[in-house]
Structure formats: structure tokens, C-alpha cells
Amino acid sequence: MVLVRAVWHWLQIVGGVLATTAICWLAAQYAFHLRLLNVQTGSMQPAFRPGDALIMRQASRQDLHVGAIVAYHSPRNPSELVTHRVVKVVPGSFQSKGDALTAPDPAVRDSLLAGRVVAMLPGLGRPLNWLRSWWGLAICVYLPAAAMTASELRRLERQYARIRAYRLHEKQMVS
């Protein structure tokens, strides 16, 4: 029983730290217009590799310059983001190229620009991908939620039992 309490206490501390970190990250995302991206392909090696994470800040046309690493919505699939280095800027559009690729991408309209990469976090993309998986959700969201619900139900049951015992004791004293 002592081991169970120690593990439960440790899980509460870790959960609190993770929740605080998540809240701080969400506040930073909102305040500074940031977004966390996972690198999926090797098109930008050696700058970053699959499994790395990128922090992207919202950008505008003025942020476009040759050499900047930007993310933009694919013209073929607007839900897909492409993150490459800008190689050419012309009025109304820009052209980019992956560092590991031989040919540049077709020109892209400025309106498809999503943001500019401001930081790279090596290796953080893998845990983020895992957290988005079924197992990651089950272990990091559903299991703690079920444990907290069970803990709260036990606490309420004990409190109800104390109140019931107190009321029975009161009735016996009145009779």
C-alpha cells in the first residue's frame, strides 16, 4: 500500500508539471503566434532531420528573404505544410528548395505562407508523434483521467460514509 501511495504521489507531481508545461506552451503559442511542427521528411537535411521539431512563428511577406526557412501550405493540398529554404523572392510569390533536394519547388503565392521557422528542437518530433498516437493518448490522457476519476469517487464515497455514520449517530442520540 505504501508503494501504491508513493507511485500515486509521483504521478500527481509529474502530471502537474506536464499540465503546467502544456498551459505555458499554449499561452506562448497564443501570445507569440507560435506553432510546433514535426519534421516528417529528410528534404532539409542536414539543417534538420525527420524526428526533429520546429517552432514556427506566423510570418508575412516582409519576412521573406533568400535563406529564410519558411513553412507554406502546399498548393496541391492546403492541409499539408512544406518547410523549405527560400531561394528566390519575386513580387506576389516566392520559390523555395529543400537543402537535400537538387531542384527548387515551383513558385508559391505569398498568400500560402504559413510562417517562418525560428527554432529547431532536435529529436522532439518523435515523442510528439507518439503523443498523437492511440497509445500516447491512452497513456497520457485517458489513463490519468480514469485514475483521477477513481480517486475522486473513492474520496466522495468515504465522505458520504462519514456523513451517513454521523446522521445515524445523531438519530440514535435523539431517540
Image: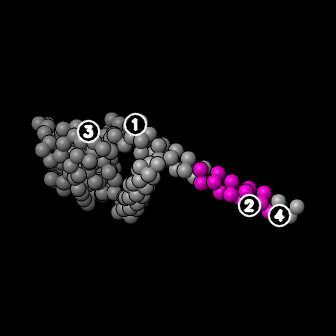
Please tell me how crowded label 4 is: few (under 14), some (14-19), or many (20+) other residues with Cα within 10 Å.
few
Which numbered disc flags the more N-terminal residue, 2 or 3? 3
Task: Determine the image quadrant of residue 171.
Answer: bottom right
Task: Determine the image quadrant of residue 32.
Answer: bottom left
Residue 128: x, y in percent? 32, 45
Q: Residue at x 60, y 49 (%)?
A: 153
Checking the image for residue 135, the label placed there is: 1
Q: Residue at x 22, y 37 (%)?
A: 41
Query: Split into 4 quadrants, where in the image is the C terminus?
Result: bottom right
Please tell me how crowded label 3 is: few (under 14), some (14-19), or many (20+) other residues with Cα within 10 Å.
some
Magenta stretch, residue numbers: 154-170
Q: Residue at x 40, y 57 (%)?
A: 13
Label 4 sits on residue: 173
Kind of element beneath mark 2: helix
Marks 1 and 4, how far apart in space?
55 Å
Mark 4 and 2 residues: CB-CB less than 8 Å, in contact? Answer: no
